[in-house]
Amino acid sequence: MRVIVLGAGLLGVTSAYFLQQRGHEVTVIDRQASPAAETSFANGGQISVSHAEPWANPSAPLKVLQWLGQEDAPLLFRLRADMRQWLWSLSFLRNCTPARTRHNIEQIVRLGTYSRSVLQQLRADTGLQYDQRTQGILHFYTNAKEFDGAQAPAEQMRQLGCERRVVSADEAVRLEPALAPIRPQLAGATFTAEDESGDAQQFTRGLARLCEAAGVQFRMGHHITALREVGDRIDHVEVTNADGRFERVRGDAFVLAMGSFSPLLAQPLGIRLPIYPAKGYSVTMPVKDASKAYQVSLTDDEFKLVFSRYTGAQGDRLRIAGTAELNGYDRHLNAVRCEAIVRRVEQLFPGAGDATQAQFWSGLRPATPSNVPLIGSTRLGNLFLNTGHGTLGWTHACGSGQALADIVSGRTPEVDFAFQGVEGRAAAGALRPARTTA
Protein backbone atom coordinates (compact mmCIF):
# COMPACT_ATOMS: atom_id res chain seq x y z
CA MET A 1 0.00 0.00 0.00
CA ARG A 2 0.92 3.64 -0.38
CA VAL A 3 1.03 4.93 3.19
CA ILE A 4 1.26 8.65 3.98
CA VAL A 5 2.76 9.42 7.39
CA LEU A 6 1.92 12.87 8.72
CA GLY A 7 4.72 14.07 10.99
CA ALA A 8 8.50 13.52 10.99
CA GLY A 9 9.17 13.35 14.71
CA LEU A 10 10.06 10.21 16.63
CA LEU A 11 6.65 8.62 16.16
CA GLY A 12 6.36 9.50 12.49
CA VAL A 13 9.83 8.29 11.55
CA THR A 14 9.61 5.04 13.53
CA SER A 15 6.20 4.41 11.93
CA ALA A 16 7.70 5.01 8.50
CA TYR A 17 10.62 2.67 9.20
CA PHE A 18 8.47 -0.26 10.28
CA LEU A 19 5.87 0.34 7.57
CA GLN A 20 8.63 0.19 4.97
CA GLN A 21 9.89 -3.01 6.64
CA ARG A 22 6.39 -4.44 6.14
CA GLY A 23 6.72 -3.76 2.39
CA HIS A 24 4.66 -0.57 2.08
CA GLU A 25 5.47 2.42 -0.12
CA VAL A 26 5.85 5.23 2.44
CA THR A 27 5.87 9.01 2.21
CA VAL A 28 6.48 11.24 5.25
CA ILE A 29 5.22 14.84 5.28
CA ASP A 30 6.28 17.53 7.75
CA ARG A 31 6.36 21.33 7.84
CA GLN A 32 9.89 21.51 9.23
CA ALA A 33 13.06 21.44 7.12
CA SER A 34 14.40 18.30 8.84
CA PRO A 35 13.08 15.45 11.01
CA ALA A 36 12.90 15.76 14.80
CA ALA A 37 12.77 19.56 14.71
CA GLU A 38 10.00 20.09 17.28
CA THR A 39 9.03 17.93 20.28
CA SER A 40 11.71 15.32 19.49
CA PHE A 41 14.42 17.98 19.22
CA ALA A 42 15.78 18.21 22.78
CA ASN A 43 13.81 15.93 25.07
CA GLY A 44 15.03 14.29 28.27
CA GLY A 45 16.71 11.38 26.52
CA GLN A 46 15.36 8.52 28.65
CA ILE A 47 14.11 5.11 27.53
CA SER A 48 12.30 4.84 30.83
CA VAL A 49 9.91 1.93 31.29
CA SER A 50 10.16 2.69 35.01
CA HIS A 51 8.65 6.15 34.48
CA ALA A 52 5.21 4.59 34.21
CA GLU A 53 3.26 6.32 36.96
CA PRO A 54 1.00 8.80 35.12
CA TRP A 55 0.69 12.46 36.04
CA ALA A 56 -2.94 11.63 36.86
CA ASN A 57 -2.71 9.65 40.10
CA PRO A 58 -4.42 9.85 43.52
CA SER A 59 -1.92 12.40 44.86
CA ALA A 60 -2.12 14.71 41.85
CA PRO A 61 -5.24 16.84 42.60
CA LEU A 62 -3.89 18.17 45.90
CA LYS A 63 -0.46 18.80 44.39
CA VAL A 64 -1.95 20.70 41.46
CA LEU A 65 -3.93 22.91 43.85
CA GLN A 66 -0.81 23.60 45.88
CA TRP A 67 1.14 24.46 42.74
CA LEU A 68 -1.44 26.86 41.24
CA GLY A 69 0.17 30.25 40.70
CA GLN A 70 3.72 28.97 41.31
CA GLU A 71 5.73 29.87 38.21
CA ASP A 72 8.32 27.18 38.92
CA ALA A 73 5.86 24.40 39.81
CA PRO A 74 6.58 20.96 38.30
CA LEU A 75 3.04 20.81 36.87
CA LEU A 76 1.49 24.19 36.11
CA PHE A 77 -2.06 24.70 34.88
CA ARG A 78 -2.50 28.12 33.33
CA LEU A 79 -6.27 28.39 33.30
CA ARG A 80 -7.50 29.71 29.97
CA ALA A 81 -10.81 30.40 28.27
CA ASP A 82 -10.23 27.19 26.36
CA MET A 83 -12.92 24.50 26.36
CA ARG A 84 -10.42 21.86 25.23
CA GLN A 85 -8.27 22.58 28.28
CA TRP A 86 -11.25 22.34 30.64
CA LEU A 87 -12.51 19.08 29.13
CA TRP A 88 -9.00 17.62 29.24
CA SER A 89 -8.65 18.69 32.88
CA LEU A 90 -11.92 17.02 33.87
CA SER A 91 -10.79 13.81 32.22
CA PHE A 92 -7.44 14.17 34.00
CA LEU A 93 -9.27 14.27 37.35
CA ARG A 94 -11.30 11.18 36.42
CA ASN A 95 -8.04 9.33 35.83
CA CYS A 96 -6.75 10.16 39.32
CA THR A 97 -8.60 7.30 41.01
CA PRO A 98 -6.56 4.33 42.29
CA ALA A 99 -8.28 1.94 39.86
CA ARG A 100 -7.66 4.12 36.80
CA THR A 101 -4.07 4.74 37.86
CA ARG A 102 -3.40 0.99 38.15
CA HIS A 103 -4.98 0.39 34.74
CA ASN A 104 -2.96 3.15 33.11
CA ILE A 105 0.31 1.99 34.68
CA GLU A 106 -0.37 -1.47 33.26
CA GLN A 107 -0.82 -0.10 29.74
CA ILE A 108 2.23 2.15 29.98
CA VAL A 109 4.51 -0.60 31.32
CA ARG A 110 3.42 -3.16 28.74
CA LEU A 111 4.03 -0.79 25.85
CA GLY A 112 7.27 0.51 27.35
CA THR A 113 8.77 -2.94 27.93
CA TYR A 114 7.87 -4.02 24.42
CA SER A 115 9.16 -0.78 22.91
CA ARG A 116 12.50 -1.01 24.69
CA SER A 117 13.05 -4.52 23.30
CA VAL A 118 12.11 -3.34 19.78
CA LEU A 119 14.61 -0.48 20.07
CA GLN A 120 17.34 -2.88 21.18
CA GLN A 121 16.62 -5.17 18.22
CA LEU A 122 16.58 -2.23 15.81
CA ARG A 123 19.95 -1.08 17.17
CA ALA A 124 21.39 -4.57 16.75
CA ASP A 125 20.03 -4.82 13.19
CA THR A 126 21.15 -1.38 11.98
CA GLY A 127 24.12 -0.41 14.16
CA LEU A 128 22.47 2.98 14.70
CA GLN A 129 24.36 5.14 17.22
CA TYR A 130 22.79 8.01 19.17
CA ASP A 131 24.91 8.64 22.30
CA GLN A 132 23.08 5.72 23.93
CA ARG A 133 23.80 4.51 27.45
CA THR A 134 22.61 1.21 28.88
CA GLN A 135 23.44 1.83 32.54
CA GLY A 136 19.87 1.88 33.81
CA ILE A 137 17.81 4.68 35.36
CA LEU A 138 17.90 5.68 39.01
CA HIS A 139 14.86 7.43 40.53
CA PHE A 140 16.01 9.31 43.62
CA TYR A 141 13.97 11.02 46.34
CA THR A 142 14.88 13.88 48.65
CA ASN A 143 11.44 13.83 50.22
CA ALA A 144 10.46 10.91 52.46
CA LYS A 145 6.76 11.25 51.66
CA GLU A 146 7.48 11.12 47.91
CA PHE A 147 9.67 8.05 48.45
CA ASP A 148 6.97 6.29 50.47
CA GLY A 149 4.42 7.15 47.77
CA ALA A 150 6.59 5.52 45.11
CA GLN A 151 6.53 2.09 46.77
CA ALA A 152 3.13 0.87 45.56
CA PRO A 153 3.59 1.94 41.88
CA ALA A 154 7.07 0.39 41.89
CA GLU A 155 5.64 -2.87 43.21
CA GLN A 156 2.98 -2.90 40.49
CA MET A 157 5.65 -2.31 37.87
CA ARG A 158 7.68 -5.24 39.20
CA GLN A 159 4.60 -7.46 38.98
CA LEU A 160 4.29 -6.41 35.33
CA GLY A 161 7.90 -7.34 34.59
CA CYS A 162 9.61 -3.97 35.02
CA GLU A 163 12.34 -4.65 37.57
CA ARG A 164 12.22 -1.33 39.38
CA ARG A 165 13.81 -2.33 42.67
CA VAL A 166 13.86 -0.20 45.80
CA VAL A 167 17.35 0.73 47.01
CA SER A 168 18.68 2.57 50.05
CA ALA A 169 20.24 6.02 49.95
CA ASP A 170 23.68 4.44 50.40
CA GLU A 171 23.16 2.09 47.48
CA ALA A 172 21.93 4.98 45.35
CA VAL A 173 25.24 6.76 45.97
CA ARG A 174 27.11 3.56 45.14
CA LEU A 175 25.24 3.32 41.84
CA GLU A 176 25.80 7.01 41.09
CA PRO A 177 28.69 8.55 43.06
CA ALA A 178 27.75 12.05 41.81
CA LEU A 179 24.91 11.93 44.36
CA ALA A 180 27.38 11.81 47.25
CA PRO A 181 27.20 15.57 48.04
CA ILE A 182 23.44 15.25 48.75
CA ARG A 183 23.61 11.91 50.58
CA PRO A 184 22.19 13.45 53.81
CA GLN A 185 19.13 14.62 51.86
CA LEU A 186 18.37 11.30 50.16
CA ALA A 187 15.34 9.44 51.48
CA GLY A 188 15.85 6.49 49.13
CA ALA A 189 15.71 5.50 45.48
CA THR A 190 14.57 2.93 42.96
CA PHE A 191 16.73 1.49 40.21
CA THR A 192 15.81 -0.11 36.89
CA ALA A 193 18.91 -1.67 35.37
CA GLU A 194 17.28 -2.45 32.00
CA ASP A 195 16.32 1.15 31.23
CA GLU A 196 18.45 3.25 28.88
CA SER A 197 19.08 6.77 27.63
CA GLY A 198 20.17 8.43 24.39
CA ASP A 199 19.77 11.42 22.10
CA ALA A 200 16.30 11.20 20.56
CA GLN A 201 17.01 13.76 17.85
CA GLN A 202 20.18 11.98 16.76
CA PHE A 203 18.30 8.67 16.71
CA THR A 204 15.40 10.07 14.68
CA ARG A 205 17.57 11.72 12.07
CA GLY A 206 19.76 8.65 11.76
CA LEU A 207 16.71 6.43 11.32
CA ALA A 208 15.30 8.87 8.75
CA ARG A 209 18.47 8.47 6.70
CA LEU A 210 18.06 4.70 6.83
CA CYS A 211 14.44 5.11 5.73
CA GLU A 212 15.46 7.28 2.77
CA ALA A 213 18.10 4.76 1.74
CA ALA A 214 15.36 2.09 1.75
CA GLY A 215 13.07 4.19 -0.47
CA VAL A 216 10.93 6.18 1.97
CA GLN A 217 10.18 9.66 0.60
CA PHE A 218 10.39 12.69 2.92
CA ARG A 219 8.51 15.81 1.88
CA MET A 220 9.94 18.35 4.29
CA GLY A 221 8.87 21.99 4.40
CA HIS A 222 5.29 20.97 3.52
CA HIS A 223 2.55 22.48 5.68
CA ILE A 224 -0.33 20.05 6.18
CA THR A 225 -3.59 21.98 6.05
CA ALA A 226 -6.38 19.38 5.88
CA LEU A 227 -7.37 15.74 5.53
CA ARG A 228 -10.22 15.23 3.07
CA GLU A 229 -12.76 12.45 3.52
CA VAL A 230 -14.69 10.68 0.73
CA GLY A 231 -17.04 7.83 1.59
CA ASP A 232 -15.81 7.14 5.12
CA ARG A 233 -12.18 7.06 3.99
CA ILE A 234 -9.46 9.63 3.64
CA ASP A 235 -9.04 10.48 -0.04
CA HIS A 236 -6.09 12.85 0.23
CA VAL A 237 -4.18 15.25 2.41
CA GLU A 238 -3.90 18.90 1.40
CA VAL A 239 -0.52 20.57 1.83
CA THR A 240 1.25 23.78 0.95
CA ASN A 241 4.71 22.89 -0.29
CA ALA A 242 8.01 24.65 0.35
CA ASP A 243 7.40 26.90 -2.66
CA GLY A 244 3.98 27.95 -1.39
CA ARG A 245 2.07 25.87 -3.92
CA PHE A 246 -1.05 23.88 -3.03
CA GLU A 247 -0.89 20.09 -3.44
CA ARG A 248 -3.08 17.05 -2.88
CA VAL A 249 -1.25 13.94 -1.74
CA ARG A 250 -3.16 10.70 -2.16
CA GLY A 251 -2.53 7.33 -0.58
CA ASP A 252 -4.14 4.08 0.45
CA ALA A 253 -3.62 4.69 4.18
CA PHE A 254 -2.76 7.70 6.34
CA VAL A 255 -0.99 7.78 9.72
CA LEU A 256 -1.57 10.79 11.94
CA ALA A 257 1.63 11.29 13.99
CA MET A 258 1.64 15.05 14.47
CA GLY A 259 1.88 15.16 18.25
CA SER A 260 0.01 18.04 19.85
CA PHE A 261 -1.28 19.17 16.46
CA SER A 262 -3.01 15.85 15.76
CA PRO A 263 -6.38 16.86 17.30
CA LEU A 264 -6.50 20.04 15.22
CA LEU A 265 -6.30 18.00 12.01
CA ALA A 266 -8.68 15.30 13.24
CA GLN A 267 -11.44 17.54 14.60
CA PRO A 268 -12.86 18.64 11.21
CA LEU A 269 -13.36 14.93 10.46
CA GLY A 270 -15.52 14.54 13.57
CA ILE A 271 -12.73 12.71 15.43
CA ARG A 272 -12.06 14.24 18.83
CA LEU A 273 -8.72 13.23 20.27
CA PRO A 274 -8.22 13.75 24.04
CA ILE A 275 -4.82 15.41 23.56
CA TYR A 276 -3.66 18.72 24.99
CA PRO A 277 -0.18 20.26 24.66
CA ALA A 278 1.93 20.04 27.82
CA LYS A 279 4.88 22.37 27.37
CA GLY A 280 8.07 20.82 28.66
CA TYR A 281 11.45 22.43 29.13
CA SER A 282 14.99 21.20 28.74
CA VAL A 283 18.42 22.58 29.54
CA THR A 284 21.58 21.37 27.82
CA MET A 285 24.96 22.41 29.18
CA PRO A 286 28.55 21.28 28.66
CA VAL A 287 30.19 19.28 31.43
CA LYS A 288 32.45 21.54 33.47
CA ASP A 289 33.92 18.96 35.87
CA ALA A 290 33.58 15.34 34.76
CA SER A 291 34.32 14.07 38.27
CA LYS A 292 31.16 15.76 39.57
CA ALA A 293 28.87 14.87 36.67
CA TYR A 294 26.50 11.89 36.75
CA GLN A 295 27.00 8.83 34.55
CA VAL A 296 23.71 7.01 35.19
CA SER A 297 20.51 8.53 33.84
CA LEU A 298 18.49 9.94 36.75
CA THR A 299 14.93 10.92 37.60
CA ASP A 300 14.11 13.48 40.30
CA ASP A 301 10.47 12.54 40.91
CA GLU A 302 9.76 15.34 43.37
CA PHE A 303 10.74 18.04 40.87
CA LYS A 304 9.62 16.05 37.79
CA LEU A 305 13.04 16.29 36.14
CA VAL A 306 15.11 13.73 34.23
CA PHE A 307 18.87 13.81 33.74
CA SER A 308 20.83 12.28 30.87
CA ARG A 309 24.43 12.59 29.72
CA TYR A 310 25.69 12.60 26.14
CA THR A 311 29.36 12.07 25.27
CA GLY A 312 29.33 11.89 21.48
CA ALA A 313 30.62 14.05 18.65
CA GLN A 314 28.99 17.17 20.09
CA GLY A 315 31.04 16.91 23.27
CA ASP A 316 30.34 15.92 26.86
CA ARG A 317 26.92 17.36 27.68
CA LEU A 318 24.30 17.24 30.41
CA ARG A 319 20.63 17.20 29.39
CA ILE A 320 18.06 18.03 32.05
CA ALA A 321 14.39 18.08 31.09
CA GLY A 322 10.94 17.98 32.56
CA THR A 323 8.09 19.91 34.16
CA ALA A 324 4.80 20.47 32.35
CA GLU A 325 2.90 23.66 31.66
CA LEU A 326 -0.62 23.52 30.26
CA ASN A 327 -0.90 26.80 28.42
CA GLY A 328 -2.28 26.03 24.99
CA TYR A 329 0.15 26.11 22.07
CA ASP A 330 2.41 28.76 23.56
CA ARG A 331 6.12 27.84 23.29
CA HIS A 332 7.50 30.95 24.95
CA LEU A 333 10.44 30.20 27.24
CA ASN A 334 9.54 31.19 30.78
CA ALA A 335 12.75 32.46 32.40
CA VAL A 336 11.53 31.53 35.90
CA ARG A 337 11.01 27.90 34.91
CA CYS A 338 14.35 27.75 33.08
CA GLU A 339 16.18 29.19 36.06
CA ALA A 340 14.42 26.75 38.41
CA ILE A 341 15.85 23.81 36.44
CA VAL A 342 19.37 25.26 36.51
CA ARG A 343 19.02 25.98 40.22
CA ARG A 344 18.03 22.37 40.91
CA VAL A 345 21.00 21.08 38.92
CA GLU A 346 23.35 23.26 40.95
CA GLN A 347 21.77 22.04 44.19
CA LEU A 348 22.21 18.40 43.25
CA PHE A 349 25.48 18.47 41.30
CA PRO A 350 27.35 21.67 42.19
CA GLY A 351 30.07 22.47 39.66
CA ALA A 352 29.23 19.57 37.32
CA GLY A 353 27.91 21.62 34.41
CA ASP A 354 28.71 25.00 32.93
CA ALA A 355 25.47 26.91 33.48
CA THR A 356 26.89 30.00 31.73
CA GLN A 357 26.66 28.08 28.45
CA ALA A 358 23.24 26.53 29.09
CA GLN A 359 20.94 26.18 26.10
CA PHE A 360 17.21 26.33 26.85
CA TRP A 361 14.42 24.73 24.84
CA SER A 362 10.71 24.10 25.10
CA GLY A 363 8.50 21.62 23.29
CA LEU A 364 4.81 20.78 23.21
CA ARG A 365 4.31 17.22 24.39
CA PRO A 366 1.02 15.66 23.23
CA ALA A 367 -0.53 14.61 26.54
CA THR A 368 -3.60 12.48 27.05
CA PRO A 369 -5.31 12.74 30.47
CA SER A 370 -4.27 9.16 31.27
CA ASN A 371 -0.74 9.32 29.78
CA VAL A 372 -1.77 6.33 27.64
CA PRO A 373 -1.11 7.10 23.94
CA LEU A 374 -3.53 6.71 21.05
CA ILE A 375 -2.33 4.03 18.64
CA GLY A 376 -4.46 2.24 16.09
CA SER A 377 -7.44 2.72 13.81
CA THR A 378 -10.26 5.28 13.69
CA ARG A 379 -13.83 5.34 12.41
CA LEU A 380 -12.36 6.13 8.98
CA GLY A 381 -11.16 2.90 7.45
CA ASN A 382 -7.76 4.10 6.28
CA LEU A 383 -6.85 6.68 8.93
CA PHE A 384 -4.59 5.49 11.76
CA LEU A 385 -3.24 7.17 14.88
CA ASN A 386 0.19 7.15 16.48
CA THR A 387 0.07 10.12 18.81
CA GLY A 388 -0.59 11.30 22.37
CA HIS A 389 2.59 9.90 23.95
CA GLY A 390 3.14 12.85 26.27
CA THR A 391 6.43 12.62 28.16
CA LEU A 392 7.10 9.06 26.97
CA GLY A 393 7.43 9.52 23.22
CA TRP A 394 11.05 8.36 23.20
CA THR A 395 10.33 5.43 25.51
CA HIS A 396 7.37 4.23 23.44
CA ALA A 397 8.45 5.24 19.93
CA CYS A 398 9.84 2.00 18.51
CA GLY A 399 7.16 -0.24 19.99
CA SER A 400 4.42 2.12 18.87
CA GLY A 401 5.88 2.31 15.37
CA GLN A 402 6.12 -1.45 14.98
CA ALA A 403 2.66 -2.08 16.46
CA LEU A 404 1.15 0.60 14.23
CA ALA A 405 2.79 -0.96 11.17
CA ASP A 406 1.28 -4.30 12.19
CA ILE A 407 -2.20 -2.80 12.50
CA VAL A 408 -1.97 -1.02 9.14
CA SER A 409 -0.83 -4.32 7.62
CA GLY A 410 -3.76 -6.23 9.12
CA ARG A 411 -1.65 -8.07 11.68
CA THR A 412 -2.16 -8.47 15.42
CA PRO A 413 0.52 -6.53 17.35
CA GLU A 414 2.72 -8.61 19.61
CA VAL A 415 2.12 -6.43 22.67
CA ASP A 416 -1.01 -6.74 24.82
CA PHE A 417 -2.12 -3.11 24.82
CA ALA A 418 -5.46 -1.30 24.51
CA PHE A 419 -5.03 -0.16 20.93
CA GLN A 420 -7.36 2.55 19.63
CA GLY A 421 -10.18 1.06 17.59
CA VAL A 422 -8.90 -2.48 18.18
CA GLU A 423 -10.22 -4.94 20.78
CA GLY A 424 -6.71 -5.89 21.82
CA ARG A 425 -5.60 -9.50 21.52
CA ALA A 426 -8.97 -11.17 21.03
CA ALA A 427 -9.28 -14.90 21.57
CA ALA A 428 -9.39 -15.49 17.84
CA GLY A 429 -6.30 -13.35 17.36
CA ALA A 430 -7.97 -11.19 14.71
CA LEU A 431 -8.21 -7.43 14.61
CA ARG A 432 -11.79 -6.25 14.98
CA PRO A 433 -13.22 -2.74 15.03
CA ALA A 434 -14.08 -1.52 18.50
CA ARG A 435 -17.63 -0.45 19.24
CA THR A 436 -16.50 3.12 19.89
CA THR A 437 -15.00 5.50 17.36
CA ALA A 438 -11.83 7.47 17.81
Image (cartoon, grey):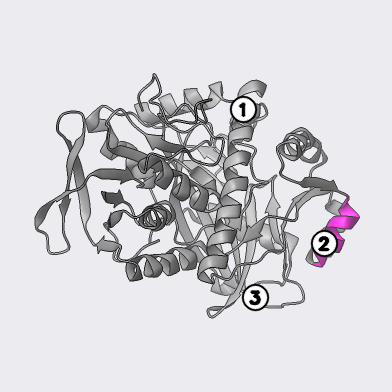
- Nearer the observer: mark 3 or 2; the answer is 2
- Counting from the top left corner in percent of width and height, residue 125 is at 53, 66
Q: Amino acid at mark 3?
A: Val
The range drawn in magenta is 168-177
CA–CA distance in space, label 3 to label 2: 20 Å
* Residue, far top: 435
- Are the two marked residues, 1 and 2, in contact with CB atoms closer than 8 angstroms? no
Q: Secondary structure at mark 1?
A: helix
Mark 2 lies on residue: 175
CA–CA distance in space, label 1 to label 2: 31 Å
Disc number for residue 103: 1
Q: Nearer the viewer, residue 209 or 414?
A: 414
Q: Secondary structure at mark 3?
A: loop
Q: Looking at the picture, does residue 11 appear above or below residue 155?
A: below
The residue under the point 67% across, 23% down is 98
Pointer 3 or 1: first along the chain: 1
Q: Secondary structure at mark 2?
A: helix
- Counting from the top left corner in percent of width and height, residue 302 is at 70, 44
Mark 3 lies on residue: 287
Indicate the quadrant containing the C terminus: top left, top right, bottom left or bottom right: top left
Q: Is residue 149 left or right of residue 122?
A: right
